[in-house]
Image (cartoon, coloured by chain):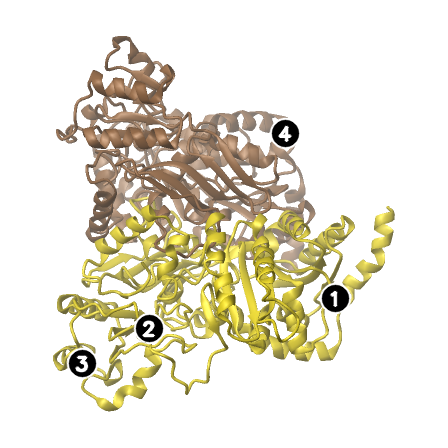
Chain colours: A yellow, B brown
Amino acid sequence: MAARQQLAPVLRRLRLARTSPNLGRQAALQQSLSRPARCFSNSTPQRFQRTPPAPAAQGKFTSDAYPDIKRDSRFAQLTEEHVAYFRELLGSESAVIDGVTRADAADDIEPFNSDWMRKYRGHCRLVLKPGSTDDVSKILRYCNDKMLAVVPQGGNTGLVGGSVPVFDEIVINMGRMNQILEFDDVSGTLVAEAGCILEVADQFLAGKGYIFPLDLGAKGSCQIGGNVSTNAGGLRLLRYGSLHGTVLGIEAVLADGTVVDDLCKLRKNNTGYDLKQLFIGAEGTIGIITKVSIQCPQRSPAQNVAFFGLESFDQVQLAFREAKGQLSEILSAFELMDEGSQALVRQVTNNKRPLEGQYPFYCLIETSGSNADHDSEKLQAFLEDVMEKGIVVDGTLAQDETQIKSLWAWREGITEALSHLGGTYKYDVSIPLKELYQLVEDTRARVDAAGLLGDTEEFPVRAVVGYGHMGDANLHLNVSTRRFDERVEKVLEPFVYEWIAARQGSISAEHGLGVMKKKFIGYSRNPTMVGLMKNIKTTFDPNGILNPYKYL
Amino acid sequence: MAARQQLAPVLRRLRLARTSPNLGRQAALQQSLSRPARCFSNSTPQRFQRTPPAPAAQGKFTSDAYPDIKRDSRFAQLTEEHVAYFRELLGSESAVIDGVTRADAADDIEPFNSDWMRKYRGHCRLVLKPGSTDDVSKILRYCNDKMLAVVPQGGNTGLVGGSVPVFDEIVINMGRMNQILEFDDVSGTLVAEAGCILEVADQFLAGKGYIFPLDLGAKGSCQIGGNVSTNAGGLRLLRYGSLHGTVLGIEAVLADGTVVDDLCKLRKNNTGYDLKQLFIGAEGTIGIITKVSIQCPQRSPAQNVAFFGLESFDQVQLAFREAKGQLSEILSAFELMDEGSQALVRQVTNNKRPLEGQYPFYCLIETSGSNADHDSEKLQAFLEDVMEKGIVVDGTLAQDETQIKSLWAWREGITEALSHLGGTYKYDVSIPLKELYQLVEDTRARVDAAGLLGDTEEFPVRAVVGYGHMGDANLHLNVSTRRFDERVEKVLEPFVYEWIAARQGSISAEHGLGVMKKKFIGYSRNPTMVGLMKNIKTTFDPNGILNPYKYL
């Protein structure tokens, strides 16, 4: 009872709205700046990358950045005859961007040649925009016969260089195939073309009382075909699970033009190997997804967000365990931030912190449910309980949409804040929960022991911080630097990869392999697995024309 | 407002407990009799099958029932030398049941030769019970070298003959590999050997506040390796999704003895093709699953069950839509029963019906959540709403565990009731929701038009009824007959399969292919898909020693 009495003032504070208009505005601004950052944050072995340059700037060619990658001489060079075939096939002028016969097409082609961060840049001279599955089939059959390599491209919002060419591969851009084809408002099954923008699909579903079971910052640009091809994780995975569970069917075209019609709309169908699963996360290397059928859940009308401080990572784990138990079916996010990451956000934004005190760890909890009163009651009871038990030291509950955004900004603003401070080594990894934060501590200790970490200018490393999707065991390890220093990279790699491999973690939690991580797959997959994957690749794409130089 | 006033007496009734002790006992008895029936109900093309014979009886050999299936002459005949190798390898006497050198082993082998329904029976003469992954690897390497065919076997609770031999295949029974290896009570990740009994795993999890994300009537016998190999659907799919979403990793042994270590414990891991997905539902044809890692949700402390009557299938769809919207995150089952099926249960059990009136359709709704008060409030509000809107005509809410079982008995008792009345043609199918019940109506009309359906003895067909897992679009079409009549079969087949194929439904919602549905796969998968599947089979098992004569 003593504990409960001592708790009272804290709980009152919990129930008080943070009403500082300053906080609201600044945070909202910060949030709008930083929303894409969370999903666009670079993963694993990004080498001293700054924020993206202005669109006008042109990045280094991937072929120069990765001199080990050589053009495969089995692939044919594009000719006028090839272009003529595609022009005849696709009809419309806008469906073929031709830099083969037209010298002035370079500017038109450039957006398809580079990723959004201008980190990868290819030498593509031909972009095709099919309007139908039949178009895709005919394009691929022709390319396979003529040994022309291709790169399937969705919204081009990937982070590992998977959706842009390395050399002169033809870009097959899916943007024209963007229609919502079918929605069953009883079962919640949506069928759409691969080029449908994620946000368009979600907005459509919102009108029906449903929600797309995937959400990410790039939703205004990314396409659901690309989402499925990269097995995007995003913000709703904790609640709705991965695309391997929610995607019911796909239609895809194989390298030889064969259309695989597996556009099942059923939740249960046990008739043979579930082949569609291979295409989920295959990054376009075994076929091009042309249509997707997906199970969509009901949209939750009620949303709550709480933010609290904790004394140790053990307490964070206890809080997560209690949140899962007590909030159970309404828990939709459980995010982790360490003090180091929050101090950097504070330093850059100068925003007032959500809590008065400082703690080694902070968590953000979001609930989504069908009844606002019930959800609030559960969340209040949970917070009272974890505070009474001493798991959580202090906390605050958002009272309205603005405050929800303010609190989220302290999580989503980390990447943006870091980018203002200098180069950052970013590792987006998955590790069994119990050791999730140990990687940050071990890395920090190692950098410190090497004499590279400190508060003054003489030290190249400013901070080693960690944050991420606790609910998905997905950690962002970030090493914030003041300047490039070769010693830092040597201290970090291969240490970080080996550390992850020793714990059976994943070097790519959600962003895939692409060009960037092709050579690192061995840290997360053994040679047997990689061998089997290569067999699959050969089975589906014997000539290797689909997205070469990447993935495996 | 008038509607609300009229509703009042109905709602009072809704809140009243059905206290008849008679109903409770009889229904509980019925329930205990029928619980396995729901999951053991035969699927698709069961030809005039009665309830399982007594254990003493021995069924017909599968090789006689399916004379088209011939023993593959590439496979070697078992010799004493083979047996000696396995005895040397596995050591313990009990790990090798040897009918090759011992004439008196027939009785010991018989339980492994036949499925639980005594519908399939093989000529197996050797049963091996490996104790480790290494055992499995050595067994398979040897079998692959010697061209000895094998059948992986879990709890042997399947319905399509997938887990018993057809000829003299060696049974590799996984029962000895039954250990729970690891549980992370923060993330909810369970790792267990394939032979672990589902109920043992679930009871273990119950002690930790977690639940296995799969439940089915055979849980006391079935093994999680078998569940994963058959992609079992079961009772919790509506809430927790399919095994393709919940299984995080597997360890499996390929035909040549290669161990595929994909025992990932992470929710996010985008490093290459998700190969484990191929093993989920592969029925042991590309490898033997030896270990499983699975994401387990928190156990819900509160459970409610409601049962109500509706005037049309359109109303059923509306009710389902409303249930998903209003009960949303707590909805854990939405079951459908037509009046025909309920009349048969009533006829056989003589139990008092849950509702006073009779309606064309009945639904059973179950909720599971973390807060009993909240859940009851949501369920009450939902029922008031759907009754006020005229979607639901009458309903009752279970007040305690006994009443929950009583209500479930009206759904789960259907299969058992049918089995008391004579032979039944059973089709366990998946159809897009809007047309789910149309199959029952069209089939009934067809049987009626053929002059085969009637209330008196002269008609071979007693009733054409439908029920099933509405939430999963999984229908059980049952044609109850008085006696075998060839005309009935001719009217039903291929009509039912063609009807399903025309609507892109599935001829096997959850039970798999096995021997029974091998030849029907073409109704649910096109030749391109089947061709790709055969490529996969050849890639993983070039000699075809794994579970031959089945699946594809």
Picture disc at residue B89:
none
**Are the residues tagged 3 and 2 within 8 Å (C-beta)?**
no
In 3D space, how far apart are the residues under numbered discs 3 and 4 (Cα atoms)?
77 Å
x, y percent for residue B374: 67, 50
Mark 3 belongs to chain: A
Same chain for marks 2 and 4?
no
Mark 1 residue type: Leu
| Image depth: mark 1 or mark 3 in front | 1
**Residue labelled with disc 1:** A355
In 3D space, how far apart are the residues under numbered discs 3 and 2 (Cα atoms)?
22 Å
Left or right relative to A504: residue B255: left
**Residue labelled with disc 4:** B20
Q: Secondary structure at mark 3?
A: helix
In depth, the one of A221 and B141 nearer the eye is B141
Q: Secondary structure at mark 4?
A: loop
Mark 2 residue type: Val
Same chain for marks 2 and 1?
yes
First of labels 1, 3 by sequence position: 3
Q: Is residue B219 above or below residue A131?
A: above
x, y percent for residue A45: 45, 64
Q: How many marks?
A: 4
**Residue labelled with disc 3:** A87
First of labels 3, 2 by sequence position: 3
x, y percent for residue B287: 31, 38
